Image (cartoon, grey):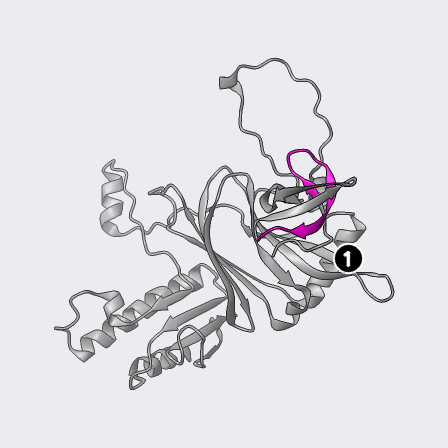
Amino acid sequence: MKFEHGDKVVINHSGEVGTIVNFINKDMAVVDVDGVKFPVFLDQINYPYFKQFSKKAEPAPKPKTYIEDVKKEKETAKYKVGEGIWLALLPVFDKDVFDDDIVEYFKLYVINQTETAYKFTYWFRLAGETDFELKNEIDPLKDFYLHDVQFETLNDNPRFDFEFSLVKPDKYKADFFEASLKLKPKQVFKRIEEMQVKQEASFSYILMENYPFKPYVENDDLKRLAAAGFTVRNQKEQARSVVDLHIEKLVDQHHKMSNFEILTLQLKTFEKYYDLAVADHLPQFIVIHGVGIGKLRDEIHEILKLKREVKSYINQYHHAYGFGATEIYFK
């Protein structure tokens, strides 16, 4: 549950601060404001420090404008972030036996500081295992509550993975954008200390500055068309952090193909996505080759031995792919 008995909360529509004294059900609580108790929906309350951190000075009077002249203004001031999409961690503090402030858990928010709406898929992983997964959309200039993360999970190598795509597809923009964030306890401790010194309510990490355009590739035919005055756009495949080489994922009519033809196509596909991963400076690349007799896996490992960009690679048990995938790490 997002709130607990005894939490200090602020009523969104009135700005009054009260205390949760009871829960009616999973959607409603009883709040005490200056001795007056009344029920309220949980989505109509929030923590007081959100109000404190988002409070703005009263704007100076503006000249009269017509409705068609009014531009959409950014609503966010809850978090100290710039343009782009961010992951914000809002620490929730408690007291220890010495009455010192300690972080009990973090509230996680994804913040959209752009004028574009996005679909997103989010995975929270601990020690390589998926602990939480969410698919949703985030509107322009809005924030989206993800979930709570306990403070002690910092010792379990937490990793936050995102895949963003446009709600309204654009033929010139990429099909998706992947972002990944790994946190180490020492780094988080430092950010918390900086946050307290600056008297801020949260700290944030950038996930995406600008949604990418589709990459383009030129060939001789395109150059000749361009020289003749035509506007040409030849889009190449986009880099992915995971590629599945099972033949049914690559081609529909594979039943008439020989084993040699299948292996050749799989290796060509691997080389293509490997090169894209290197070109896009991905830190990690996973290739799904299956188990079988290990022929495709062995061929890929032989290729990787000759790649200068490879820091290491390993074929170990993976919670999503079993032993049928090799994880590649770049320098």
Q: Residue at x 55, y 38 (%)?
A: 141
Which region is colored magenta?
10-25
Q: Residue at x 58, y 34 (%)?
A: 74
Query: What residue is pinned by disc 1?
Result: 193
Give 259 or 271, whichever is nearer the viewer.
259
Q: Is residue 52 visible?
A: no
Point 68% across, 65% down: residue: 151
In-image side of 71 versus 57 (left or right): left
Residue 218 place in picture, x, y as percent:
30, 50
314 vs 158, nearest the viewer:
158
Measured as percent of width and height from the top left, residue 210 is found at 50, 45
Is 125 rendered above or below residue 173? below
Q: Is residue 304 above or below residue 26?
A: below
Using the rendered view, name the quadrant where residue 259 is placed.
bottom left
10 Å crowding of disc 1: few (<14), some (14-19), many (20+): few
Where is 228 relative to 270, above or below? above
What residue do we see at 45% from left, 75% from top?
Answer: 319
| The furthest residue to the bottom | 293
Which element type, helix, strand or loop, lies under badge 1? helix
Q: Amino acid at mark 1?
A: Glu
Residue 276 position, x and y percent, is: 39, 61
The single residue placed furthest to the right in the displayed view is: 98
Image quarter of the N terminus: bottom right
Examine the structure image and report whether residue 22 is included in the region drawn in magenta: yes
Residue 235 seen: yes
Q: How many marks?
A: 1
